[in-house]
Amino acid sequence: MTGKPFYTDYARHMFRYYIPRRDDKSIVFHSDAEKLNFGAAQRTMGRMIASERVILEDVYLLAGDTRTSVQSVAKSYNTNENNIWQILNRAEKLIAKERGLI
């Protein structure tokens, strides 16, 4: 048991789907849930400050697991991994609220 909130994996899934497609004007949604998730991610990113958005984008655009991505981004920004995790946790909580999970 990792002790992470129940919505964490779903939140990360939404960001991993949204971030690479955020500027795609011709995106086709295959379900209502996909459209709702995309909108929730879009609104959540809009609530984050610019520097946090950049960090989220950097983390979720990297291939591989989240822990490795956080380590890589923290190193590239010469900051503590905990700072990156705090941004991710805040964003995940916001998107979970947007989708009515909490």
Image: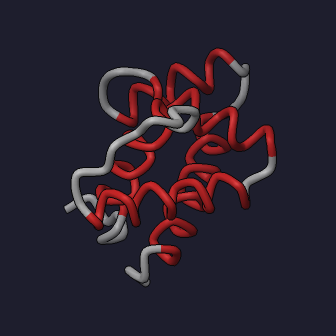
How far from the left and from the top, in percent, is residue 98? 52, 74
Instruction: State the colouring used for the structure image.
Output: secondary structure
Q: Closer to the camera, 93 or 31?
A: 31
Quick one: which residue is furthest to the top in this view?
76
Q: Quadrant of residue 50?
A: top right
Q: Residue at x 23, y 60 (%)?
A: 31
How far from the left and from the top, in percent, is residue 24? 51, 32
Quadrant of image for the N terminus: bottom left
Q: Residue at x 52, y 68 (%)?
A: 93
* 34 vs 22: above or below: below
Q: Quadrant of residue 91?
A: bottom right
Q: Residue at x 55, y 50 (%)?
A: 88
How far from the left and from the top, in percent, is residue 84? 62, 41
**Residue 52 in view of the camera:** yes
Q: Quadrant of residue 75?
A: top right
Q: Residue at x 56, y 47 (%)?
A: 85
Quick one: which residue is furthest to the left in this view?
1
Q: Closer to the camera, 54 or 41?
A: 41
Q: Closer to the camera, 34 or 96?
A: 34
How far from the left and from the top, in percent, is residue 46? 71, 55
Horizontal side, residue 17 vs residue 84: left or right = left
Quadrant of image for the C terminus: bottom left
